[in-house]
Image (spheres, rainbow, N blue to C red):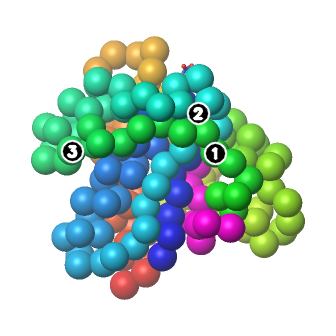
């Protein structure tokens, strides 16, 4: 299984999604390929936001090795599932999809927990620290569900 986690900057939400998913598959003994990307390029090459690093660390997950990169159309070939955090990410990724098969790979990640509700993982960038705790919890739940549905 090849999974790509996508948000806007690839420094707050999707690095956590990548870290949490890597952590959970390791526990399950799975060897899936997990990566993350942002629809925007402003933070390319940067480490995750310190607040994401902190909440991950507090939960026993090290995401300091990650570096931000922009989503590219080739990612539609490289991955089986592309999980986006909100409706804006969804729109931006779908705009780059070359055909239906590519479009079908893209879904809002929280729809795995709350089907068809199109709930977003809120962008915590401008908020306080509790925003990152909420994001962590949501993504932990979503990753757990994604894995359970594939076992
Ligand atoms: P992310 O959060 O999409 O969860 O990585 C953001 C990070 C940076 C910006 C926006 C959102 N920004 O505007 O720079």
Q: Taking 126 as reference, is 60 above or below it?
A: below
Q: Residues within 10 Å of mark 2 (few under 14, many from 20)?
A: many
Q: Are marks 2 and 1 in contact (CB under 8 Å)?
A: no
CA gap between label 3 and label 2 equals 21 Å
Span of residues in magenta: 77-87
User: In front: mark 3 or mark 2?
Assistant: 3
Q: Residue at x 53, y 31 (%)?
A: 44
Give the quadrant of the C terminus. bottom left
Cβ atoms at labels 3 and 1 below 8 Å apart:
no
Q: Percent from the top left, x then y, of residue 10?
A: 50, 36
Q: Which residue is mark 1?
A: 71
109 inside magenta stretch: no
Q: Secondary structure at mark 3?
A: loop
Q: Residue 29 at x, y = what percent?
A: 23, 78
Q: Which mark is residue 62?
A: 3
Question: Which of disc 1 and disc 3 is earlier in sequence?
Answer: 3
Which residue: 62% across, 30% down?
41
Whether residue 34 sits left or right of residue 82 in the image: it is left
Q: Residue at the location (64% across, 31% down)?
A: 40
Where in the figure is residue 82, as x and y percent of width and height? 59, 59
Q: Any mark on residue 8, and which?
A: 2
């Amino acid at each position: 299984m090849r999974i790509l986690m996508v948000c806007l900057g690839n420094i707050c939400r999707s690095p956590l999604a990548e870290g949490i998913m890597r952590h959970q598959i390791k526990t399950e003994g799975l060897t899936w390929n997990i990566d993350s990307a942002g629809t925007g390029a402003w933070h390319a090459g940067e480490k995750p936001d310190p607040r994401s690093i902190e909440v991950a660390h507090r939960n026993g997950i090290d995401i300091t090795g990650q570096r931000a990169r922009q989503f590219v159309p080739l990612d539609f070939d490289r991955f089986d599932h592309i999980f986006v955090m909100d409706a804006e990410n969804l729109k931006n990724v779908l705009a780059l999809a070359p055909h239906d098969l590519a479009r079908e790979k893209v879904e809002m990640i929280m729809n795995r927990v709350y089907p068809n509700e199109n709930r977003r993982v809120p962008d915590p960038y401008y908020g306080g620290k509790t925003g990152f705790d909420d994001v962590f919890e949501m993504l932990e739940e979503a990753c757990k569900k994604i894995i359970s549905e594939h076992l």
